[in-house]
Amino acid sequence: MKLSTIAKNIRKQRKKLGLSQDKLSKLAEVAYNTIVKIESGENSNPTVETLIKIARALNIPIDKFDRYAIINFRRIKIVDNLKIKEGIATI
């Protein structure tokens, strides 16, 4: 199975920060299995909400996962300011 750009970039940034998949899942407040499935390619289409949480935990803009991420945001009508439970994520 070919890994997506998103999977590769999440893994690359996680390893760069010295984080385990378990630690990332806790920081991002997503299930451990979610991180494993995304990085393994089993889940090649994670939700935008999940990607935002992971990006925040990795302290990077979401478009660093995939150069087309911004297109996906606009496609589902999420524009400059995306309101999430605890605050606002900017693109």
Image (cartoon, grey):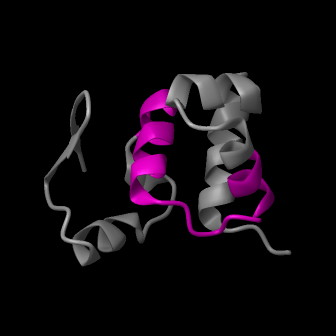
Quadrant location, the N terminus: bottom right
Quarter location, residue 86: top left
The picture quadrant where one finds residue 27 is top right
Considering only vertical position in the picture, is 84 above or below 75?
above
Asked whether, in this view, residue 87 is left or right of residue 2, the answer is left
User: Does 89 sit above or below residue 18?
Assistant: below
Task: Give x and y (percent) for residue 16.
Answer: 68, 30
Q: Is residue 59 magenta?
A: yes
Residue extending farthest to the left is 80
Position of 18 with respect to 26 (left or right) is right
Is residue 25 visible to us here?
yes
- The x, y position of residue 49, in whole percent, is 40, 50
Please provide percent x and percent y for residue 60.
Answer: 43, 37
Residue 17 can be seen, yes or no: no
Count of number-bearing discs: 0
In the drawing, does residue 69 fall left or right of residue 6?
A: left
Vertical order, 84 against 59 (above or below): below
Q: What residue is at 47 percent from the left and 60 percent from the top?
A: 47
**Does the magenta run of residues contain 23?**
no
Q: Secondary structure of the magenta portion, mostly?
A: helix
Which region is colored magenta?
36-60
User: Residue 35: image x %, image y %?
Assistant: 68, 44
Camera-side residue: 66 or 83? 83
Question: Could you tell me which residue is drawn at 26 percent across and 73 percent down?
Answer: 76
Q: Residue furthest right?
A: 1
Q: Tell me which residue sits at (27%, 77%) in the image.
A: 75
User: Residue at the location (51% across, 39% down)?
Assistant: 54
